[in-house]
Image (cartoon, rainbow, N blue to C red):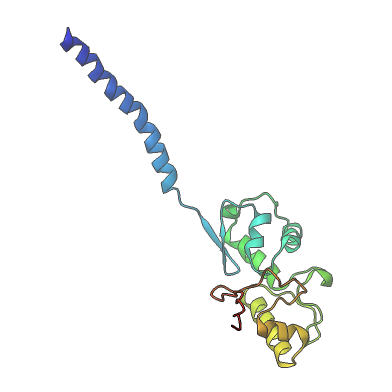
Amino acid sequence: MATQDKQPQAKEKPQKQKEESPKKHSMRHEDEHEEVLVRVAGYDIPGSKNLFAGLTRIKGVGWFISNAVCLKLGFSRDKKVSELTKEEIQKIEQFLKNPDIRDHMKNRQKDEETGETNHYIGADLEMKKDFDIRRMKKIRSYKGIRHTSGQPVRGQRTRSHFRKKGQLVSVKKKKDGK
């Protein structure tokens, strides 16, 4: 009888393993799933995002501009980025280079050099920002001085924040004059 008890147990173990193996296989399948990236205006946008949220990944494009792109070009805001065709991507890039929106929505109003109102995205926006900071440092404005010293520029408190990593600020004890 002892041999008969061992045989049913041996049959039960392979059944349990067969039940567990599909679960493991499905988890492996999920791990192998790769995200589709779509390149728009020099930025990689995950294909699973909605067009409305995905466009905000581009530097210089916020929610306001993203909504304007969807409305002006006639795209659904809920459309997935991975569903865009090459022609639609070109339309979006063309719109972002020269947006047909009101001046108050643009990020560069009354430029210091040209006096025009433009909207910049990506590397152009970063370059303009760097030139502005250099100009403020050069003319020694208050904001320029704050930039050079590494202090907050827009009026934030400095007592407990804005300490750079690596700089240890400690309180020194007074030595007794004995």
Picture coordinates of residue 123 (x, y %)? 62, 76
Name the residue: 78% across, 74% down.
155
* Residue lying at the far bottom of the rendered structure: 139
Residue 117 drawn above or below residue 74: below
Quadrant location of the N terminus in the rendered image: top left
- Does residue 21 appear to the left or right of 142 in the view shown? left
Query: In the orientation shown, which residue stands out farthest toward the front?
Result: 178
Viewer-side residue, 88 vs 109: 109
> On screen, 117 above or below 141?
above
Nearer the observer, 24 or 78 = 24
Q: Is residue 77 above or below residue 95?
A: above
Quarter residue 141 falls in: bottom right
Q: In the image, residue 46 lies at what x, y percent?
A: 56, 56
Rendering quarter of residue 62: bottom right
Which quadrant of the figure has residue 72? bottom right
Query: Which residue lies at the image location 73% right of the left edge and 77% below the top edge?
Result: 153
On the image, the x and y values in percent for residue 45 come to: 57, 60
> Measured from the top left, where is residue 168 in percent x and y?
56, 75
Foreground residue, 73 or 61?
61
